Image (spheres, helix red, strand yellow):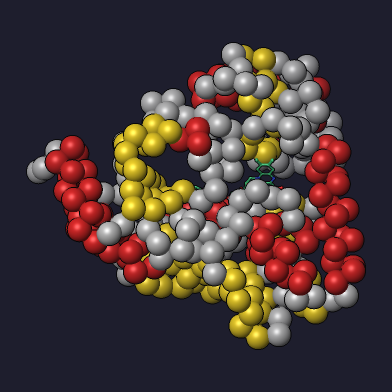
Amino acid sequence: MLDRGVILNELKQYLKDIGVRFSENEPMNRHTTFKTGGNADLMVFPNGKQQLSSVLSFCGAEGILPFILGNGSNLLVSDDGIRVPVISVSEGFDELRLLDETTVYAGAGTALIKLCKFALEHSLSGLEFAYGIPGSVGGAVFMNAGAYGGEMRDVVDRAEHLTFDGRPGALNSDSLHFGYRHSAYKEQNCVITGAVFRLRKEDPEKIKAKMQELLQRRKDKQPLEYPSAGSVFKRPEGYYAGALIEQSGLKGKRIGGAAVSERHAGFIVNLGGATTSDVLALIEICTSPVCQAPESPAL
Ligand SMILES: Cc1cc2nc3c(=O)[nH]c(=O)nc-3n(C[C@H](O)[C@H](O)[C@H](O)COP(=O)(O)OP(=O)(O)OC[C@H]3O[C@@H](n4cnc5c(N)ncnc54)[C@H](O)[C@@H]3O)c2cc1C
């Protein structure tokens, strides 16, 4: 069996041969909203489905499982970096078009905020909840991103993908098995390439007002002035993670450059120079038994 270095060199040569852009020793803190993480040995930037399919076919044949990067807004990358190839789904995956009056196709690399604005321009309602979530369409479908009572499940009709060995496929809303911050893609080796959204006609003034209201709620409650990955913890049933952490007296707790946010205890923020180890140490403290749920539910 060839060793990892040899396979990576072969992959780099292949990328050069077929004209796919890549970079080596790419600092992951440039690609994560937490602004932490070591270097990725190799980051690949396919310019569309054809290049992506070729890269995946190569990886499949060599038994390489790549890591898929969206906008990096839900990622905590090890300080030691990433050894497997990282495939960035961004450039070349930002197509946005109307399929009919109320149906929109968005490439996986499209920023959610851009998709929301496109929906507003076409007087289409359904995506207001997503205005302000700093992810890509692919990342949002992958984890069924949601906020303020809405989630991807409510609007995604179908998602398209390439398997990790380069074969095209699609999942409809039933087979996406959306759950709380979960989709079927979490159990499958696939790259989401785009999604179809089923929306409804609405007065654009109403859509805009809702988006602005929800964005304001974020600005009021969330520490958006610091790098973070949003809420770190899933909601324990019957409770809010932020409230539990606050009740445990951990608001403001600091390790290195990372701290439990003073403004929203469910957020860990990078106050400057934080490492992923700092963040992990805080997560460990917040989830340790002394910080378990009190007797009476907070809800
Ligand atoms: C300030 C702030 C506020 C936030 N608020 C919310 C919120 O209200 N609700 C919420 O749900 N989230 C929130 N988040 C978290 C984050 O924005 C969402 O989870 C978003 O959906 C992640 O998308 P991404 O493109 O950044 O994915 P990434 O962080 O790049 O990746 C996340 C996961 O998705 C996988 N992935 C990404 N793209 C693809 C693809 N094309 N194909 C296959 N797998 C893929 C990655 O491999 C990884 O496992 C917030 C984050 C921040 C920083």
List x then y, in percent, for residue 177. 56, 63
x then y, percent, for residue 30: 50, 36
> Residue most toward the left?
1
Question: Image check: 58 left or right of 177?
Answer: left
Q: Quadrant of the N terminus?
A: top left
Front residue (pair 294, 118):
118
User: Residue shown at 81%/49% (left/top)?
Assistant: 215
As drawn, 174 above or below 88:
below
Image coords of residue 145 (percent x, y): 64, 53
Q: Is 253 positioned to the left or the right of 161 in the image?
A: right
Vertical position of residue 66 compared to residue 231: above or below:
below
67 up-or-down from 161: above or below: above
Tell me if I can see residue 4 in this picture.
yes
Residue 182 shown left or right of residue 120 in the figure: left
Number of numbered tags placed on the structure image: 0
Residue occupying image coordinates x 37% and y 72%? 168
Residue 46, relative to residue 123: is it above or below? above
Q: Quadrant of the C terminus?
A: top right
Q: Is residue 298 left or right of residue 180?
A: right
The answer to which quarter of the image holds residue 153 is bottom right
Residue under the point 50% across and 40% down: 31
What's the residue at 57%, 20% (across, down)?
A: 273
